[in-house]
Amino acid sequence: MVNDAQTLENLHTETRSFPPSPEFAEQANARAEMYTQAAADRLGFWREQAEHLHWDTPFTEVLDWSDAPVARWFGDGTLNACDNAVDRHVREGRGDRVAFYFEGEPGDSRTLTYSDMQREVSKAANALESLGVTKGDRVAIYLPQIPEAVVSMLACARIGAIHSVVFGGFSSDSLRQRIDDAQAKLVITADGGNRRGAHLALKPLVDAALAPSEANPTEAESVEHVLTVQRTGQDTEWTEGRDVWWHDVVEPASDEHTPVMVEAEHPLFILYTSGTTGTPKGLFHTTGGYLTGASYTHRVVFDLKPETDVYWCSADVGWITGHSYIVYGPMINGATQVLYEGVPNAPHEGRWWEIIEKYKVSIFYTAPTAIRTFMKWGEAIPNKFDLSSLRLLGSVGEPINPEAWMWYRRVIGGDRCPIVDTWWQTETGSIMISPLPGVTAAKPGSAQVALPGISAAVVDDDANEVGPGRGGYLVLDQPWPSMLRGVWGDRERYEDTYWSRFKGLYFAGDGAKRDADGDIWLMGRVDDVMNVSGHRLSTTEIESALVSHPWVAEAAVVGAKDETTGQAVVAFVVIRDDSEAANLEHHEVAVALREKVKSEIGALAKPRTVLLVSEVPKTRSGKIMRRLLRDVAEHREVGDVSTLANATVMNAIRDNMESGKADDD
Ligand code: WT7
């Protein structure tokens, strides 16, 4: 388990509590009675939440758990996700409401109302159909954070196609893997995107992904077309017959389209995520339950008042946070949102606060890693902007340390905004554990309580619930509507990964503690998954990328505590004696290895620290002892080495690390 000493310390001493102000409580969407109501009749509670959606055929059955652990929620109902997120608002007279204030990195902006979205999405849906995409087909989306990304996702949903969004920071190899696994028929991309004043290419990466390569001797056979948005105007190669421009097929298409109603359990999307072993898993979510979870949690956790709030979630649509809390949850609730293409420090370090001031953002949702970065840049920067429009702040992605929580509250929230620390996962589809604003007295650093309708427990190795003040594993012990329905094409992997550790309980992979009040504190992953800047990375996946470099004999990767990014990737690498690397400077080797990881997985997985070692510590049965390497990476005393095959190896590794031989990025 990754123990955060500071969090543990605060766990026993944290006495600060921030009860809601009477004014906030008075107007809050959430009510304390929801906990008792949901506990008394859980399925009735979820029925009520699902009834907020527009159903074409109303459901009669709430939950069918007979094929556990694959759930069926609202199974006999039919609906359409895009109809709920877009058309319904137009139909009910809300068409003129702004859906998105888009802010491009170069400073361009666009305002799109719900009526505009309906036209855009209808055109895109007609274009997808003209390209031969129909219900059940998979579409890979590899786009920057521009309105077309949202439009593409909703256009897929509108025709019953299943989207698989691949974050633009992933490499062409990663993209190819995901395209092949889902057998995507269409790829939607852009010529490129904007990053700190430069143009990042995307289409060339798609071309490379689809072409034969060392890793894939054949062309990607499932792909019939590549639909390309012109964003930067970069030159791009063109494959006649396969490639089509967005402006050639979407712009001229009819702006009328009737959404295809689908069964509640029809898959809505696939999203790949790193696990402990092997290749990324294609987690999939279905329509009715997922939309119920995303919209309900968005309404109560963010206290959305759609007529007056301006909501901004800073995540990328390429991650689950963007799916649930930019596209589906907020749009179903009729929110007005900010969508921003760029990074926080271009063209200056106050860019986010400038955007909050410009659009009078009232609800803001971001990640602890961003908050810690802003702390480092200094409070003088946010202080230059008028942030008085803010009334609620959210955090997601990793445990937020109490110090960052307090800074967020004071500097950004002016000591007046409730903070919701939201724990959830790609798998859970929507927020599971969070304070309820207006109800819960918040504690800095704790996600605290399972939402009404959700049942979480902290258990020991034998699945017994732990008492107050004790730690263990976080599990969810009742099915919930937005739970994943499986790993695409691999039911066994789904059952093995999530349901085999504790019989009948969903095992999240996180360690947690209960404090004296029974509140939950998340302690980080207990498996070989790292959390770097809120991005989930697999140690074994990065090790395979390193080992695929011809210089490398062996590699061991750990996540080490990092002040800004939460965890950072630290790689211990054994170089082949007979390789040319033996004659290179350590730094040159490290640079080449980082490039290898970038090309295999993506820049987000590049090791911060590389240390060349002569051996990696292993047990007698050959298992890498990552626990000891983590001690070295975090500059701690090395733990028990008695199970090592060769106990002296750790001394050399530690000495090299402490004498500054590691290469830091
Ligand atoms: C893992 C899931 C869900 C959106 C972003 C990440 C960690 C997430 C919190 C939080 C402590 C958190 C967990 C979880 N995590 N939110 N508020 N407090 N830890 O989604 O990539 O599926 O990663 O992120 O370790 O298992 P993801």
Image (spheres, rainbow, N blue to C red):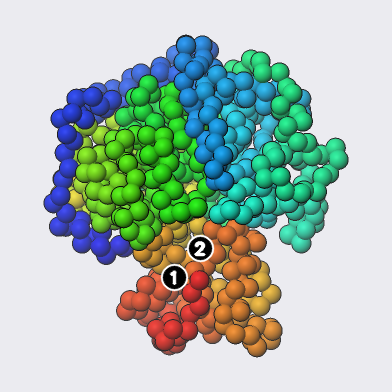
Q: Quadrant of residue 418?
A: top left
Which residue is drawn at the image coordinates 16% and 39% (left, top)? Answer: 19
Q: Secondary structure at mark 2?
A: helix
Task: Name the disc covering residue 539, or none.
Answer: 2
| Amino acid on which disc 2 is placed | Thr
Residue 29 seen anywhere in this rendered image of the structure: yes
Q: Quadrant of residue 45?
A: top left
- Residue 322 placed where, x, y %? 49, 39
* Rendered residue at 62%/20% (across/down): 119
Q: Which residue is mark 1?
A: 626
In the picture, measured across the screen, residue 149 lies left or right of residue 132, that is left
Taking depth in this image into account, of 146 and 369 the one nearest to the observer is 146
Q: Of the numbered discs in the image, which one, if any, rests on residue 600? A: none
Residue nearer the viewer, 189 or 612: 189
Q: Do the CB atoms of the residues marked 1 and 2 lie less than 8 Å apart?
A: yes
Could you classify mark 1 by the number of other residues whose Cα lies within 10 Å: few (under 14), some (14-19), or many (20 or more)? some
Give the quarter of the figure containing the N terminus. Answer: bottom left
Rendered residue at 15%/30% (across/down):
22
Examine the rendered structure and indicate whether residue 201 appears above or below residue 617.
Answer: above
Q: Quote the CA–CA distance across marks 1 and 2.
A: 10 Å
